[in-house]
Image (spheres, helix red, strand yellow):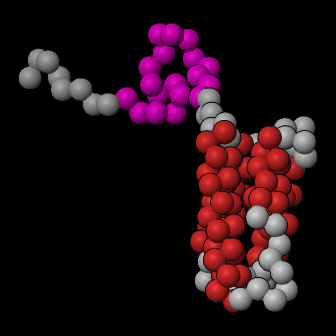
Amino acid sequence: MPIDPGHLRHHLNELRSTLRWLRSLRPDGPRYKLWLGDVVEFTRVAFGADSEEAARVRGVLLERGRLPDDAEEMERVRDYLWRLDAFADVLAQFESRMPHPVTFISIDAGPDAGPESNGASAPERPDPGT
């Protein structure tokens, strides 16, 4: 069963806002890893595990590989910020591909019915005889 696009957009916006906050944390901390798990799960549910979008997430993770354990702290920070920037681009692309929710209005009255038949009130019109 497909998930409501509005619901998906809500989760995507949460991921994007958390991404901005993650920039202030140390590289590869537990909060980043939890967020990354949320990104992977969101991608799987919204687009599918074998989708082009899932491949983009894997691409960000695999493009530069893991730094060696003895890497300098500045190198770790640079790599971490690069990954966050790359994920920001991926999430922006996800948003552009996501359908916008559509709202339908049902009018049960016939074509000659006034606006009050659908719950709206008719605007007052000046009396032409005055």
- Nearer-the-camera pick, 101 or 24: 24
- Nearer-the-camera pick, 111 or 25: 25
Residue 43: where, in percent of width, then height?
Answer: 81, 51
Residue under the point 67% across and 54% down: 91
Residue under the point 71% across and 89% down: 72
Q: Is residue 49 visible?
A: yes
Considering only vertical position in the picture, is 81 above or below 92?
below
Residue 69: where, in percent of width, then height?
Answer: 85, 86
- Nearer-the-camera pick, 2 or 66: 66
Q: Is residue 31 visible?
A: no
Residue under the point 47% across and 28% down: 116
Considering only vertical position in the picture, is 63 above or below 32?
above
- Start-end of magenta stretch: 105-122
Left-right relation of 109 to 11: left
Q: Main secondary structure of the magenta part?
A: loop
Quadrant of the snapshot with the N terminus: top right
Left-right relation of 55 to 80: right
